[in-house]
Image: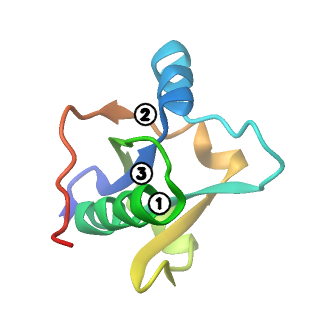
Amino acid sequence: MKYRRGFTLYRVVKPEKLGDILLYRRFRNLGSAEGKYFSMTVKGAASYAKQAYYGFGDPPYTLVKTKISNSLLRKLDMIFVDRGIPAIVVPDSNLLSLVPQVLNFLPLPSR
């Protein structure tokens, strides 16, 4: 999924984080973590939302996508989380460079 101007990343967010994104039009870290996890695939983001919804009773999630520059992406390590989802952690210092785009759909993987 490489694009001329970057690579697309995905994140699913709960209603309160969605409100923050819509208000500030940025990803902000409101907790004590040093960055935010982003899935490298839409399927991975949807899988996490499904696991959290059924496993923890979380409210429905909203899918958000963004683009990260190829130069920044090369500096970050890909990791596998939550049963094999390819992801990266974007440090707080780089979050402001990511512009979120809220999507009005979330594909749900089969049960």
Residue 63 rendering spot, x and y as whole percentages: 32, 43
Foreground disc of the pair 2, 3: 3
Helix, strand or loop at label 2? It is loop
Residue 24, relative to residue 58: is it above or below?
Answer: above
Specify the quadrant of the image occupied by residue 33.
Answer: bottom right
Circle 2 crowding by C-alpha within 10 Å: few under 14, some 14–19, many from 20: some
Distance, label 2 to label 3, CA atoms, is 12 Å
The residue most toward the top is 23
Alpha carbon separation for disc pair 1 and 2: 25 Å
Q: Amino acid at mark 2?
A: Val
Q: Secondary structure at mark 1?
A: helix
Q: Residue at x 41, y 67 (%)?
A: 51
**Cα gap from disc 1 to disc 3, whole angstroms:** 13 Å
**Vertical arrangement, residue 41 with respect to residue 67, above or below:** below
Whole-percent x, y for residue 29 in the image: 70, 40
Residue type at mark 3? Answer: Arg
Residue bearing mark 2: 99
Circle 1 or circle 3, nearest the eye: 1
Mark 3 — residue?
Answer: 11
- Residue sitting nearer the eye, 89 or 56: 56
Mark 1 — residue?
Answer: 52
- Residue 87 lies left or right of residue 42; in this view the side is right
Give coordinates of residue 74: x percent, y percent: 48, 73
